[in-house]
Amino acid sequence: MDIIFLRNLRIEAIIGIFDWERKVKQPVFFDIEMAADIKKAAASDHIDDTLDYKSLSKAVIDFVEKSEFQLVETLAEKVAELIIHDFNVPWLKLTLNKKGALRHADDVGIIIERGSKPQ
Ligand SMILES: Nc1nc2c(c(=O)[nH]1)N=C([C@H](O)[C@@H](O)CO)CN2
């Protein structure tokens, strides 16, 4: 199994349970690892034979910028669903970091794995 990844994808969104968080966008940071088989693209050298991380990141940015969830759990789950369904990804590991949400921690958030790893 091969992996295509994105690290520290920064997106501004309405996210949070407190009144002020419903009014002001905050940055959230995504690390995403996705199962892929890169052999065909490596042989053909053609973008159509692989998962295009540019179009994938654009779809994630568009979705998150328009989202207004309360919990990081919900946002992470919805982004995972989008990637699995719209980009035919069989397995992913997604980290959502809501940096700055806790005064006494550098990083806080959630890590989820969804789907099945191909053999
Ligand atoms: N498990 C969670 N706990 C908390 C969340 C969350 O999304 N998931 N959110 C908050 C607040 O919005 C927080 O980020 C503001 O500091 C608190 N706990």
Image (cartoon, grey):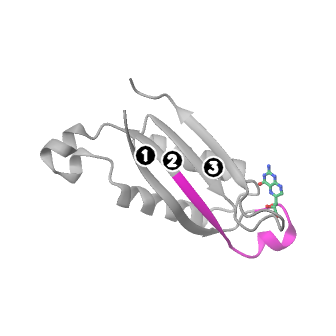
Q: Residue furthest top?
A: 119
Query: Residue 52 location, x and y as percent?
Result: 32, 53
Q: Position of residue 98 (x, y in %)?
A: 70, 61
Q: Mark 2 is on which residue type?
A: Leu
Stretch of the chain drawn in magenta: 16-31
Residue at 16% in and 50% down: 45
Q: Residue furthest bottom?
A: 24
Q: Quadrant of residue 16?
A: bottom right
Q: Quadrant of the C terminus?
A: top left
In the image, what residue type sits under mark 1? Asp
Residue 104 shown left or right of residue 63 in the figure:
right
> Residue at 77% of width from left, 65% of height from top?
101
Q: CA distance from mark 1 to mark 3?
A: 15 Å
Crowd class of label 1 (few under 14; some 14 to 19; many from 20; radius 10 Å): few
Left or right side of 42 for 70:
right
Among numbered discs 1 and 3, the one appearing first in the sequence: 3
Is label 1 in contact with label 2 (beta carbons under 8 Å)? Answer: yes
Say the numbered circle drawn on residue 5: none
Furthest residue in direction right, as rendered: 19
**Horizontal side, residue 26 vs residue 87: left or right:** right
Instruction: Give the number of the disc on residue 82.
Output: 2
The reply to whether dot 3 and dot 2 touch (C-beta < 8 Å) is no
- Which residue type carries mark 3? Ala
> Alpha-carbon distance for marks 3 and 2?
10 Å
Q: Which mark is residue 76?
A: 3
What residue do we see at 78% from left, 69% from top?
22
The location of residue 37, given as percent across then percent down, is 31, 36
The nearer-to-camera label among 1 and 3 is 3
- Who comes first in sequence, dot 3 or dot 2? 3
Q: In what element is the residue under mark 3?
A: helix
